[in-house]
Image (tube, coloured by chain):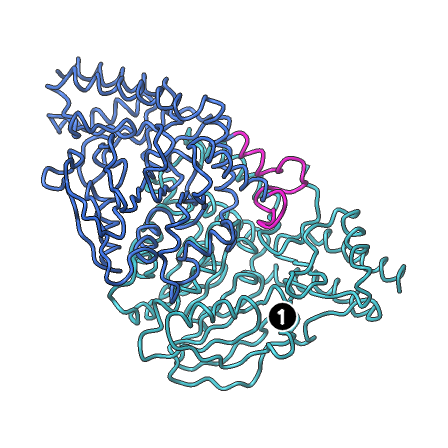
Chain colours: A blue, B cyan
Amino acid sequence: MRNKHNFNPGPAVLPEPVLAECARAVLELNDTGLSLLEISHRSPEFAEIIEEAETRLRQLMNIPDHYHILFLQGGARLQFAMIPMNFLSRGKRAGYVDTGIWASKAIEEAQKIGSVQIVASSKDNNYRHIPRRFSIPSDLAYLHITSNNTIYGTQWWEFPQTGNVPLIADMSSDILSRPIDVQQFAMIYAGAQKNAGTAGVTLVIIRSDLLEQIPSEHLPSMLDYRAHVRARSLFNTPPVFSIYVTAKVLEWIQNQGGVPELFRRNQEKASLIYAVLDSYREIYEPHAAPEDRSIMNITFRLRNERLNDTLLQWCQDAGIVGIKGHRSIGGFRASLYNALPLKSVEVLAEVLKAFAQRYG
Amino acid sequence: MRNKHNFNPGPAVLPEPVLAECARAVLELNDTGLSLLEISHRSPEFAEIIEEAETRLRQLMNIPDHYHILFLQGGARLQFAMIPMNFLSRGKRAGYVDTGIWASKAIEEAQKIGSVQIVASSKDNNYRHIPRRFSIPSDLAYLHITSNNTIYGTQWWEFPQTGNVPLIADMSSDILSRPIDVQQFAMIYAGAQKNAGTAGVTLVIIRSDLLEQIPSEHLPSMLDYRAHVRARSLFNTPPVFSIYVTAKVLEWIQNQGGVPELFRRNQEKASLIYAVLDSYREIYEPHAAPEDRSIMNITFRLRNERLNDTLLQWCQDAGIVGIKGHRSIGGFRASLYNALPLKSVEVLAEVLKAFAQRYG
């Protein structure tokens, strides 16, 4: 029986009805006489699935027609390379904001391709906050940000105004968790395995004029956004199953009332945990600056770190998994993605409260 | 009910027990209390899955320890780019054999990166045969071949002797279908969605000394084989579900008696179809030269092409799907991958025979 409270940072919890539907489709897709895993990616059945995924995503995020939607492989990591390969031409410079390990890995990959300027960083205080009031040179090829930082538990609540500089955001860990204005961005990308499905597919939302900046020569086809746009994500065999899971997750989000309703729930869930942490500050030390707190990933340490294993044991006894912090900052991390039920959050809040009362 | 005779060229038919096990794992993986789609790729559960996949592949193909096994994303198409990016350094030249559309797409990608010599080609006779008796310059960075050509229905039955030149093979459509000597190759790669699983994962088998040829600078990490080798395919979030399917397909192959037994069955299946085509040559025109015939993909045309739709209808009435030829050569293609039951092949053979008798 699937009965854990799943706080995994990704791949992460999925909605029960989505899992049931995916399991059925593995046995037989609708009444095709075939498993979902056996259909051709050129079949009408798959055309319907990928179109469903695209249409639902467009509806949920209010994506205008002059943005393309792609379903690619390789995760955010491959996007780290593709973005500069496509948009950082010789003689240009790209801007990056360094808000944590994932942001700095994106920076490293861009530096291999071309000239990079780190326009702001919160590295000096161990990425506790999101940089504010930094200047953005108007001649940048693009500005890259990481909208939510899973490891540190910070999140951008106000996006930078970049004027004519295309803003590109890695939204792997908060896409579809809160309303955003897509038109603030030239490109958004996200590995699906946190809020939008399972591992194996990456969502890319890209404004069509950005494609005109791509130098035409020597770019491998698989790494050229134009090839994927032209082929509507069927340039090569796509990850059929993962795209199906995404389509079903998007349907589930619509059935729940869309992104605004999930945002309301996510705020409610996060505030339950933050409230306990803030009530017992002699026990818990939250990592992120209060004004930059993420509602997706809540990070904290115990003031007495010798109690770490005890708290882990309490969590385990309550059926809670995935709560251990990332090895780079230690402590604890509770990931509260869209599909995590309120019930699971209540269980964790109770454990944290009882633990604080016992050891406070 | 899953009841079609599935001759799809890929993604393709999978064994019934594998599908049942995958559907169960989507609901709950073993007794973890979590769905397979929700587990962390850093969990002990996933470590076991990927190790199982690697161990079984090593056993099934007798892969020596000095070869690494990787599970990557992006399909054979991304390998087309990664191979020259990693191994075709400046001042070097790579050799390619052009045996069809996939081989020539690999050539196009290599030409974007460096210097390419097409050492042999069967393009002049519409790829009906596999080139023989061509010379291989001893200074090539590597020689690349496509072991089975899905579109034309040809297959290499004797691999070129390359001496010190590393031989690299795209085995996407015949891996695990027949015994091969891995040690003839420096690298083998294959999209899983034909004989080794479902779409979303690519198998790469790579001899460790080849890694030393990679120039160390400016290669994006995701496109650098060394990064994946160091991280044992966990450089970034891997396609968890697709790797699980592969592990289960490999287990199924072992339960069937391994690659030699599948080879015996595949020969039997292919000969059933070829026998009918050869018995009714006034009706059917097989594409491939007899000595280079593939046992994976059988391609043929009707001499009277006005009967194409009729034959398609006969097939459809018998529950046969995926039989239409690739748009580039037309006609028909029967893909007989490992998991296709003999029963399905018998049904097709009967249809072809009855059709020939009716219209002969």
Q: Magenta residues, as a range?
A: A20-45
Residue at numbered disc 1: B154
Look at the image and tell me in which quarter the C terminus of chain A lies. top left
Above or below: residue A128 compared with residue B347:
above
Q: Position of residue B205 (x, y in %)?
A: 42, 62
At x 51% / y 49%, what residue is drawn? Answer: A232
In the image, B135: left or right of A183? right
Q: Position of residue A176 (x, y in %)?
A: 38, 31
At x 49% / y 49%, what residue is drawn? Answer: A233
At x 14% / y 25%, what residue is drawn? Answer: A285
Q: Position of residue B107 (x, y in %)?
A: 47, 71
Q: Amino acid at mark 1?
A: Thr
Q: Camera-side residue: B91 or A216? A: A216
Above or below: residue A76 compared with residue B27:
below
Q: Camera-side residue: A77 or A230? A: A230
In the image, A93: left or right of A31? left
Local secondary structure at mark 1: strand
Q: Crowding at label 1, few (<14), some or many (≥20) Cα neighbours within 10 Å?
A: many
Please tell me whether residue A39 belongs to the stretch shown in magenta.
Answer: yes
Quarter where residue B220 is shown:
bottom left
Above or below: residue B249 compared with residue A266:
below
In the image, A257: left or right of A264? right
Q: Position of residue A342 (x, y in %)?
A: 36, 18
Please tell me whether residue A72 belongs to the stretch shown in magenta.
Answer: no
Q: Camera-side residue: B137 or A58? A: A58
